[in-house]
Amino acid sequence: MTSLLAVYLREMLILRRRLLRQLLAMSVSPLLYVLTFGLALGGSVVVDGRSYLEFLIPGLAAMSSMTQAFAIAGEINVARFYLHVFEEFQAAPVSRWSFVLGETLAGVTRALLAIAVVVLLGLAFGVRLQYGLAFWGAVLLNSLAFASLAVGMAMLVKTHADQALLTNFIITPMAFLGGTFFPLEALPSWARTILSFLPLSHASKAARDGAFALPTSFFPYLCLFGAAVSFFILAVWAVGKARD
């Protein structure tokens, strides 16, 4: 527990020093999406009886939970390649599980801040939804999955520049194809089948159903939980491989 807290608190100290800048950075993309897609383009669009802006906000919350949770990989890479902090953790009595869990929780913390920014942004534009357990459960599991994935990928890349490639080839396509900006039901069945393998697709649906107070299916939560456990195990393995 002590080693876990050491890993987590280190990231929180860094986040505290940059908190204002981080919050501003977390606000830019959602604000642009709300202004362009939600207001400018979606003013006359109705999705399942709701305005497009109401449809968009839960999807943006799910997307932000993914991008900000995965962003912890950048912090890990800076510490690993430039500050050599990972070497210090190797020399210290810090288990692989403690390291992965500490970094994962740090990524989840960043994600929760980003989700709060999106929710407040929606309130500022007059969007009143139900942010209950169903909504927060979906975005929390999504954050756990992508924070765990971030730790694993950060341990496998060979240079800091490689991390940008992972973001471009994994996170960016998923952000646009995971049900953030359009209902997946509008796609052909073969496309829905392919996109159903994306964790963000399940997070967007579960978060949107929760925010709309619709009947909730356990299937998206089970998929997100399975992804979180799988990525966490991958991260533990990757940390062991990096140590070797």
Image (tube, rainbow, N blue to C red):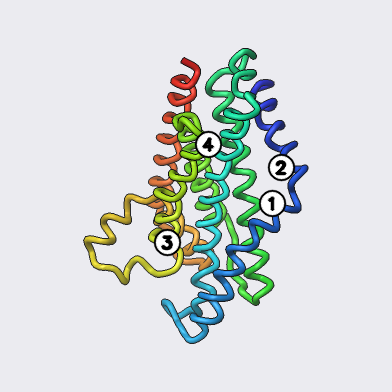
**Location of mark 1 (residue):** 22
The secondary element bearing badge 2 is classed as helix
Q: Which of marks 2 and 3 is nearer the N terminus?
A: 2
| Residue drawn at point x = 45 percent, y = 57 percent | 175
**Location of mark 2 (residue):** 15
The secondary element bearing badge 4 is classed as helix
Q: Which amino acid is tagged 3?
A: Phe
Q: Quadrant of the N terminus?
A: top right
Q: Which amino acid is tagged 1?
A: Gln
Q: How far separated are the C-alphas under marks 1 and 3? A: 22 Å
Q: How crowded is mark 2: few (under 14 residues within 10 Å), some or many (20 or more)?
A: some
Q: Toward which corner of the image does residue 57 lie, by quadrant?
A: bottom right
Q: Which of marks 1 and 3 is nearer the N terminus?
A: 1
- Residue 53 image point, x, y percent: 54, 75
Q: Which amino acid is tagged 4?
A: His
Q: How far separated are the C-alphas under marks 2 and 3? A: 27 Å
Q: How far separated are the C-alphas under marks 4 and 3? A: 24 Å
User: Compared with residue 183, is residue 44 higher up or lower down, i.e. above or below?
Assistant: below
**Location of mark 3 (residue):** 176
Q: Nearer the viewer, mark 4 or mark 1?
A: 4
- Residue 132 image point, x, y percent: 59, 58
Q: How far separated are the C-alphas under marks 2 and 1? A: 8 Å
Q: How far separated are the C-alphas under marks 2 and 4? A: 20 Å
Q: Which amino acid is tagged 2?
A: Leu
Answer with left or right where residue 81 lies relative to residue 167.
right
Q: Residues within 10 Å of mark 3 (few under 14, many from 20)?
A: few
Q: Earlier in the sequence, mark 2 or mark 1?
A: 2
